[in-house]
Amino acid sequence: MTDIVPAEADGTLERLAAAALWADAEDAALVVRRLATPPGDRAWTVLATPDRDGAVFTSIGADGAGHIDLIAVDPAAQGRGIGRALVGAAEEWMRAHGAAEARFAGNPPCYAWPGIDVRYTPAACLAESLGYERYRVAWNMTAGLPARYDEAEHEADLAKLAAAGVTVAAAPAGERATVAAFVREQWNDKWAWEAEQATGLHYAFRDGAYRDGAFRDGEILGFAAWGARPLWFGPMGTAEAARGLGVGRVLLRRCLAEQAAAGQTSAQIGWVGPLRFYSRAVGARAERVFWLYRRALD
């Protein structure tokens, strides 16, 4: 039987993740660091084999469900039952923290992936062999960088925003409280946390913005972020009163331009809903597919 013990999310685990997660080797170390700095009220831990040839991040979600956030086994050690032992240890930890259900699914706002990337076939096989039920499918889109889009449409969007008195700006780290409050009010705490943690955050505002049947001075109309999940784009949202102005397209393109300037040659648009919007706005294509799994804990 494989021993599993508590571990630190250190450089050894970063290297393990890079070796095991071939489809995410470029940002595996960044994902390990992100998972190790979740919201302050999250219950989470890292468990590993004594010689660090396998490790699992696990946490409790806001709804009380347990999550397997990341599992990695060194390619040289695969086939020895390490993955099964890691899941078993994670489930025991979840039970001890009151979880009645375990999931292979992203635990927003701090997550690695929406679920199991279908390309990681052994991970999906492991989940199914342990009795996990596939209950949902999610997907990402990929945008090549620099982003491709209709320059005339973009100039028309900028002119429309200017005519409506809308300004777009970047919110530097440490100066995001107002934008985060807008995101929290319009959407939820999870997106607000991501907006505050993101590498880049852009927003649109207009004096006399319309809300609650009246115009209010200086209100924010929309936001877009990137890097909350390392190297990915999102989240993004536009207030209902401002839809149709092109706010989303302009903010999306600003973020992608920043990602290109940071050296990225492509950007993942995570956990996508509106395929058509991203396809038309920046030529993004649906690419990564994730299966979400769950099972009741006995």
Image (cartoon, rainbow, N blue to C red):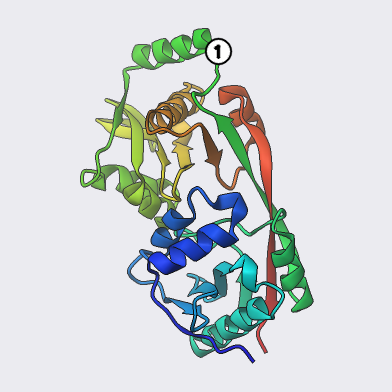
Q: Horizontal placement of 65 versus 81: left or right?
A: left
The answer to which quarter of the image holds residue 36 is bottom left
Packing grade of label 1 (10 A; few <14, some 14-19, many >=20) is few
Q: Amino acid at mark 1?
A: Asp
Classify 74 as above or below 219. below
The answer to which quarter of the image holds residue 131 is bottom right
| Element assignment for label 1 | loop
Residue 40 visible somewhere in the drawing: yes
Residue 214 visible somewhere in the drawing: no
The residue beneath circle 1 is 150
Considering the image in quadrants, where does the N terminus appear? bottom right
Tell which of 5 and 164 is nearer to you: 5
The answer to which quarter of the image holds residue 70 is bottom right
Tell which of 46 and 98 is nearer to you: 46
Q: Residue at x 72, y 72 (%)?
A: 127
The spot of residue 136 in percent (x, y) is: 71, 59
